[in-house]
Image: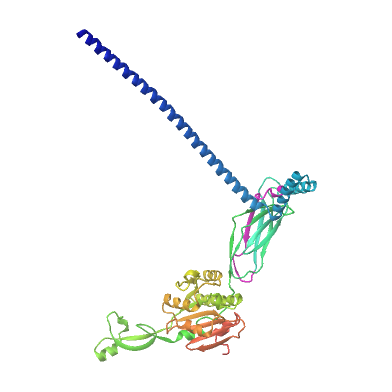
């Protein structure tokens, strides 16, 4: 019994071991097949990703090429060229489909015209253009002179072409003849009298085009000039004589500790200067007494220029107002007076009535001041002159005299209301620019109103030589 039991035990053990071995073998085969399947799927996914990336790159390159071709076509093909290209396409297609010889001939002729126009586009970038101006600051109405030098920097013969030079909203054209390599041609540039403003001259643009005007190729250079066209000004009398001196000569009602116009003697207060002690009064009263003065009018002047379209009859009247304001500011700068030149600023329509803004024109020297006047324009959306005067009075300190320059669109009552924005001790002079009016000077409820029809009337009025 013992021997048989031992055999059975070995048999069972051996059979169990075989079973485990078979099971483990089957498990290994199953894992291997699963690994092979996952590897295949990962390879397919990587191939799909590579294909997607490749197609994305191809799509982007094609889109970029199409955009470049569209931009080139829009810049190169003129309306006449587009019409000829359309005629070529329609003629060839219809001729081949229906056997119409006439349409085929018309399409072939259109294709030949386009092919013949292509050589005229070569060499557009072989030029070197140098643009110079004799003056970049002129007075309105004066001509601007300059020179343009065109040089062939290429190694081939340059076909005849054209150079366009934008001048503000206009265009100046130059014909360029046949140029050999290294040769150049110089031509004078004459720009007729321009209106006041900041005019951009350039950039010079080389233009290649065929004789029929089917195709056109341009290349712009970087040479751009800004010409400041200053307003016309007139010589005014010095502010130490005439009307301005009369307005500034009288004392104000503001009391100060030191000036020329004696006012009274008062008791000494802490902080008073000892130099102003009046010793005789001190000896009589037994207390320290000091002198007190009325402040004389100082050379603090403001020039307010209205820029709203509704305040002028036309653009010429506005130019007269700008010239008058510039003449007043120029005279004040030459006399070394403190002057502020203020104009209204453009305000968006959505915030008009809720936003107030003014702009100061530089007045430290004549050139910056005239450059600032070159950039002043009529504005459709801005504050009326009364609000501009109110902001000027708030921002300026102790003005002695203020000039308010307006057009004929501002009635006298509105001009009086604008003058009320300044302090009571500031003399206000209203200057109405009306080309249809005669020059005159009239006092109106505490202010002086000057009316000018031409720029030359201003000097006579300031000298008080005009008849009322």
Q: Please indicate whether residue 84 sits to the left or right of residue 202 in the image.
A: right
Q: Please indicate whether residue 389 sits to the left or right of residue 223 in the image.
A: left
Q: Position of residue 160 (x, y in %)?
A: 72, 52
Quarter of the image for residue 10 reads top left
Indicate whether 332 appears above or below 37: below
Quarter containing the C terminus: bottom right
Quarter containing the N terminus: top left
Regarding residue 347, the answer to whether it shows in the image is no
The front one of 303 and 258 is: 303
Indicate whether 63 appears above or below 232: above
At x 56%, y 70%, the residue is: 374
Quarter of the image for residue 206 reads bottom right
Q: Position of residue 396 (x, y in %)?
A: 43, 76
At x 50%, y 78%, the residue is: 385
Regarding residue 67, the answer to whether it shows in the image is yes
28 inside magenta stretch: no
Quarter of the image for residue 79 reads bottom right
Q: Position of residue 102 (x, y in %)?
A: 80, 48
Residue furthest left in the image: 2
Residue furthest bottom in the image: 284
Indicate whether 205 appears above or below 181: below
The front one of 460 and 110 is: 110
Q: Which residues are magenta?
A: 118-142
């Amino acid at each position: 019994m013992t021997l048989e039991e031992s055999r059975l035990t070995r048999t069972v053990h051996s059979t169990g071991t075989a079973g485990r071995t078979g099971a483990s073998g089957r498990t290994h085969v199953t894992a291997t097949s699963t690994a092979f399947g996952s590897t295949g799927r990962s390879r397919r996914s990587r191939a799909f990703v590579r294909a997607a990336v490749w197609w994305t790159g191809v799509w982007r390159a094609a889109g970029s090429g199409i955009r470049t071709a569209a931009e080139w076509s829009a810049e190169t093909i003129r309306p006449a060229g587009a019409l000829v290209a359309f005629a070529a396409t329609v003629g060839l297609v219809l001729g081949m489909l229906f056997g119409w010889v006439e349409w085929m001939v018309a399409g072939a002729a259109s294709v030949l015209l386009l092919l013949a126009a292509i050589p005229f586009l070569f060499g557009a970038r072989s030029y070197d253009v140098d643009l110079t101006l004799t003056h970049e600051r002129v007075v309105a109405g004066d001509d601007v002179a300059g020179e343009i030098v065109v040089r062939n920097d290429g190694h081939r013969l340059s076909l005849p072409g054209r150079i366009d030079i934008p001048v503000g909203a206009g265009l100046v054209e130059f014909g360029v003849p046949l140029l050999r390599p290294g040769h150049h041609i110089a031509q004078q540039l004459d720009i007729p009298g321009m209106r006041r403003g900041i005019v951009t001259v350039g950039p010079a643009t080389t233009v290649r085009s065929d004789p029929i005007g089917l195709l056109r190729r341009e290349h712009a250079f970087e040479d751009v000039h800004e010409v400041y066209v200053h307003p016309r000004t007139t010589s005014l009398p010095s502010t130490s004589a005439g009307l301005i001196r009369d307005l500034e000569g009288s004392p104000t009602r503001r009391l100060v500790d030191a000036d020329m116009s004696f006012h009274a003697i008062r008791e000494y207060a802490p902080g008073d200067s000892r130099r102003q002690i009046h010793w005789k009064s001190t000896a009589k009263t037994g207390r320290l007494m000091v002198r007190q003065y009325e402040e004389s009018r100082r050379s603090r002047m403001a020039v307010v220029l209205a820029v709203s379209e509704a305040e002028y009859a036309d653009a010429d009247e506005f130019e007269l107002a700008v010239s008058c304001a510039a003449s007043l500011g120029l005279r004040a700068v030459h006399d070394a007076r403190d002057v502020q030149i203020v104009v209204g600023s453009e305000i968006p329509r959505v915030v008009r009535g809720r936003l107030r803004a003014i702009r100061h024109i530089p007045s430290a020297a004549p050139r910056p001041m005239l450059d600032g006047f070159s950039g002043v324009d009529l504005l459709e959306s801005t504050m009326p002159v009364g609000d501009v005067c109110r902001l000027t009075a708030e921002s300026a300190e102790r003005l002695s005299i203020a000039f308010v320059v307006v057009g004929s669109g501002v009635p006298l009552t509105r001009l009086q209301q604008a003058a009320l924005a300044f302090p009571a001790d500031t003399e206000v002079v209203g200057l109405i620019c009306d080309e249809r009016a005669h020059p005159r000077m009239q006092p109106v409820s505490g202010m002086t109103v000057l009316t000018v029809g031409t720029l030359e009337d201003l000097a006579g009025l300031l000298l008080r030589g005009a008849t009322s």
